[in-house]
Each structure stands twice: as structure tokens, then as C-alpha cells.
Amino acid sequence: MSSQRHYSPADRLLMQADAALRTLLPFSGQPSRPSPAVLKNDSELTESETRHVAGLMRINHTGEVCAQALYQGQALTARLPQVRQAMEQAADEEIDHLAWCEQRIRQLGSHTSVLNPLFYGLSFGIGASAGLISDRISLGFVAATEDQVCKHLDEHLGQLPAGDDKSRAILEQMREDEAQHSTAAIEAGGLRFPAPIKFGMSLMSKVMTKATYRI
């Protein structure tokens, strides 16, 4: 006998509202893993280095907000139960990244982006639309998005001050996790997006990073 629960559309909408609140309200997401930064020593950063690292971590935090919204939107409209479960599991794993980035931002004496609700809404709409088209498109969008995230993380790792081991440990673990999500989405049947679509996604990503670095 299957133990899988079946939720009504109203139940799923309430679950989406709960997920949105847990994503957007400060310190509401509870990570399942401790932050990799816990095992690293504090380092002395100059004022300009602190501002820069805080900006980078703010970008990454907003990226995780977008990832949460994307997965939740896709889970809402996914046709196959296994795809919906995969999206929900990925969203749970991304909560770790969300919490780690927020913790580091607060340690640096800064704040998360005030634009997060806007980006959450836009990403949720994109995810839901992709799920309505097909599960293969939806999974392909996950893979392409995670590939973009990995590129950003590589760039940020190259910009971190040499002594900032805490931020580096967080971004390195995030990089590993995101690459696994991309691979899993393709292996689950995701469509490999052509270069022009990936280029368009890259341009949209640049808008997000420019907007959230300081705001």
C-alpha cells in the first residue's frame, strides 16, 4: 500500500504560501546541515572587503530565494508525481544554502536584499509556467539554472579575499550541491537547453546580480 499522501489544490496552495513565508522571512528556514563556515576561523577583513563580500553573499542569498521559488512553482504544476517529489526535495536542500548565506550576511553586519519578494514572485511564475509546458522542459530549466548558478559561484570564489575562509567554505559546498542538482535534473529526463536560451538566462541573471549587490 502506497504511503504517499495526496493533496488537494487548496492544500498545495497553502503549502506554497508557507514555503514563500519561510523563504522570505528572516531566519525562518531551518537548515538540515550546519554551515560549512562553522569549522573555519574568523579573519580580519578591511571595511571595503567586508562590504564586497556582503554584496556577493547577498547576491547568492537572492539566488537561493529564486531557486526556492522556481522549485516550488515547478512542483505546483508538475504532471508526474516523481517529478513533483524531485522538485520538493531539491527545494528542501536549497534551504541549507539560503540559511548559510543569510547567517554569513548577518555576521558581516549587512542585510539581505529588499528585492527578494519581487524576485521570488517572478521565479515562481517562471517555474510554474515551465511545469505547465512539460516536465521535460521543467527539469531542463532546473539544469540550465543550476549551471548559471555554478558560473556565478565560480566568479565569486575568485573574488573573495584570500583570508575569508568562512565565505569560501559556504560557496564551495554550494557549488558542489548545485552541480549535483543540474546532473540529477538531466538524468531524470530534462531537456538540454540550446545556447541561445542559456544566453538569455545569463542576461536575466546579470540583471539580478547588479540589482541585489547593494540593495
Image (cartoon, rainbow, N blue to C red):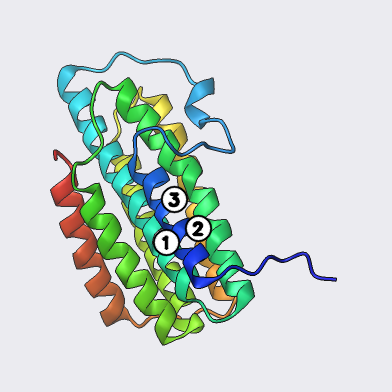
- Circles 1 and 2, Cβ within 8 Å, touching? The answer is yes
Residue 27 visible in the current orientation:
yes
Q: Is residue 110 above or below residue 91?
A: above
State the image coordinates of residue 153 (x, y, percent, origin top left). 36, 48
Q: Is residue 207 above or below residue 33?
A: below
- Circles 2 and 3, Cβ within 8 Å, touching? The answer is no
Q: What is the C-alpha distance between the residues marked 1 and 3?
A: 24 Å
According to the picture, the residue beneath numbered tag 2 turns out to be 179
Residue 180 visible in the current orientation:
no
Three-letter amino acid code at disc 2?
A: Ala
Toward the viewer: 166 or 102? 102
Q: What is the C-alpha distance between the residues marked 1 and 2?
A: 7 Å
According to the picture, the residue beneath numbered tag 3 turns out to be 18
Query: Sequence-wise, which precedes: disc 2 or disc 3?
Result: 3
Q: Residue at x 64, y 73 (%)?
A: 82
Q: Secondary structure at mark 1?
A: helix
Q: Residue at x 44, y 34 (%)?
A: 100
